[in-house]
Amino acid sequence: MLQIREISKSYTTGDFTQIALDKVSLNFRENEFVSILGQSGSGKTTLLNMIGGLDQYDSGDLIINGKSTKKFKDRDWDAYRNNSVGFIFQSYNLIPHLSLLDNVEMSMTLSGVSNREKRRRALDVLEKVGLKDHIHKKPNQLSGGQMQRVAIARALSNDPDIILADEPTGALDTETSEQIMELIKQISRNKLVIMVTHNPDLAQRYSNRIIRISDGKVISDSNPINTAEVSGNYRLKKTSMSFFTALKLSWKNILTKKGRTSLTAFASSIGIIGIALVLALSNGFNQQINSFESGTLSNYPITISQSSASISQPSTSTKKNSSIKYTNKPAVYSYDSSKNTAAHTNKITQSYVDYVKKIQPSLLDAVSFTRSVNMNLLKKSGNKAVPVDTANLNLGSYPDKPAGGNYFSQYYHLLAGNLPKDKTDLVMVVDEYNRLDTSLLKELGINSKDGESISFDKIIGKQFKLILNNEYYKKSGNTYTVNGSPNDLSNLYNSGQAITLRISGIVRIKEDTKTPSLSSGVYYSDQLAQYFIGNASNSEIVKAQKEADYDVLTGSSFSADSGSPSSAGSSGGFGPNMSRSTSATGGSTKVSLTKNEVLASLGSTSIPTSIALYPKDFDAKQKVTDYLDKWNAGRKASDKINYQDLAAMMTKLSGSIMNAITLVLIAFAAISLIVSMIMVGIIIYISVLERTKEIGVLRALGARKRDITRVFNAETFIIGTCSGLMGIGIAYLLEIPANIILYNLTSLKNVAQLNPLHAAALVVISIVLTLIGGLIPAKMAARRDPVEALRSE
Ligand code: ADP
Ligand code: MG
């Protein structure tokens, strides 16, 4: 039971308002065949659209089974169209890329009928309209009459109460028209059929009620009814389209334009290809760097030095300074560097040294302690004995091998002599070219010119005498001096207490050694240093120095024991160089030292100024640094001991350079991604234009706005997935030639390696970006007015 009450509808275009319906009131029976006659432009289609809920009235009311539709929302209208109304159009309005069966099933799909039931009902109605044999054909494979039959089948499929037909035979020849009219007549036996026609003859012959309208007004009604209100419970089943249906719909649509879609997908995959290749390369290079590092850099030592380990950080006042940068004020500003840097001093203690010594020996290739003790060394020069300038010898201790064995045996070639056995054996290290500095040779008593060759046996067996502190120094007044004449220390040299040190061997780093080599010079064992320090710490001069608040060697005062411990130990890491260059005997320098430094140089303490740990490999290094980190856990900042991990610093550096390059390249590739996103937007926009009719049909069948968005989102989803997969596939293919080229250029194997995780992420990015690109056109599509959409051609 359908009633319309005083419905009005007008269209405004520009300044002109066209009243299409003017207070039309009509009642319809549950089953009747109503024909609406009228001239073109009289408002017939408008009336039908009002009844069908395809368009909304301006004023009045449409009452369905006693229920007013005044308060209907979009969703209610959608459900009403889907459940209660079947449309038949003059131009059939079938969805061209779907088979007959799919076309007929569509409105049932929207209302969520199960697949099997859908199929059964569709076959049933298709049989009724006589098309059972054609169900898999596409609409364009049918004649006009057949297409209209499909449209009728579709209108019937959801078993609606009302069939609305807008000039259903307008495009058909007479004979076919009559067949279609017969079909509609049959339907009207148990449904309300309202048919618009401008053919009075057909109306007379088939319908049982004729309403004529003119200029939007009903001018005659052959069989009017006046009904009492029928109240009933009118319930609507809400419609919705599943994403899968949307996908299927769009997939079938895309299949009709495979060429264009694959071109689009390819074009938009270029950005993905770019990013994938950049990622593959950077991934590969990073792996190369890592393996290079784990191979090469693992043997770079972890160094712990007493000097500040953390880089000085500019403190707050520097910021203030930036405001007077390039100032024009006629003034200079004072700047206390010690206040403006946050330096950290590692306070290496005996317990820390013990802690370090407890590192599992198997993790370390070598351990090197640098001590700032000054050994009292004498040498023979002609008939005389004179002090050795240890700086010239580049004297230092060689690393220990905690796991046992000799440090040199692993990484060095023995060129002459023997590896050190006793603690008194010294080792001469030469560089890759067997070179020694002329000043070093001179210190050995060998005068040479640049480039001159010197035979090994002139060096092997060279002797020095180590004199213990108590022997070496004698007290004179308040200070200590060397016990002997400055020109000849033969007494000390020949004394029974003097310890003979001997260069036992000459070594050179092996060709492909990963560990950094010691700089060329003379090296002694750490046991010797410990022995000397053990003795020195009880020596008179050390005791005296501990008491005195001036330098007992020079008589000069100390510099403050401030936080700039720049002098002690060369903390670079590789050349464990113990000499402080201020030899007490060989003419003291002008550098003023702190008390602690003087004490250390005299051998008062066995605590090293720096420790270098050479891990066995990358994993061992990790374990060692973890172990060292454990020491700091829970300690005050000032008590923390920071180590320097050269390899890690280099790793970080090369890693961050790589990352920077990667970022730049990705930025470029991202631009093409954005471009493709816009392109997809355009493609979808075109698709929306092309599918306008389909939008109208779907809306007429009860699809919600949201469903329309979903259809187009499904399309972008498909394009995005295709372009993502295509991009990844092409990128994987391009890796092959890229790797061949890189191998030829750099002899690095398999540099380009796309991480599967990255690949997956890129596909997702592609989908997301295309979805974003298609979002606006999809929303536009949803907002299309269904009536206009149907009108479009
Ligand atoms: P009929 O189906 O009887 O030929 P319509 O119902 O299509 O007539 O149109 C009735 C009147 O409303 C016509 O004058 C037409 O121009 C006008 N009209 C219909 N739809 C619109 C619209 N979307 N915008 C402006 N005018 C419209
Ligand atoms: Mg019309």
Image (cartoon, rainbow, N blue to C red):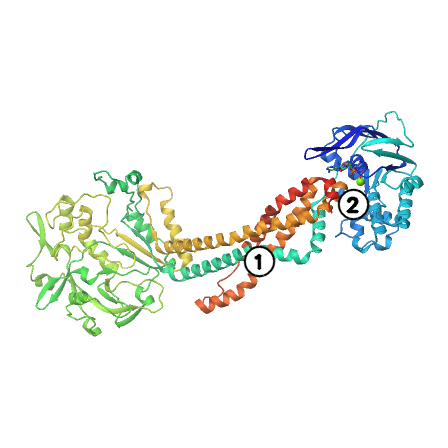
Q: Quadrant of residue 11?
A: top right
Q: SS for tag 1?
A: helix
Indicate the position of residue 750 as horizontal and vertical percent values.
49, 64
* Whether residue 127 is situated above or below residue 33 in the rendered picture: below
Q: Are marks 1 and 2 in contact (CB under 8 Å)?
A: no
Task: Say few, some or many: other residues with alpha carbon within 10 Å of mark 1 (under 14 / 14 to 19 / 20 or more).
Answer: many
Give the camera-side residue of 154 and 784: 784
From the top left corner, tell me how far across and down residue 690 is, in percent. 69, 49
Give the structural element (helix, strand or loop) at label 2: loop
Front position among marks 1 and 2: 1
Instruction: Indicate whether 231 appears above or below 606.
Output: above
Q: Amino acid at mark 2?
A: Ser
What's the residue type where badge 1 is placed?
Ile
Residue topped by disc 1: 728
- The residue tagged 2 is 114
Residue depicted at 9% across the width and 49% down the height: 479
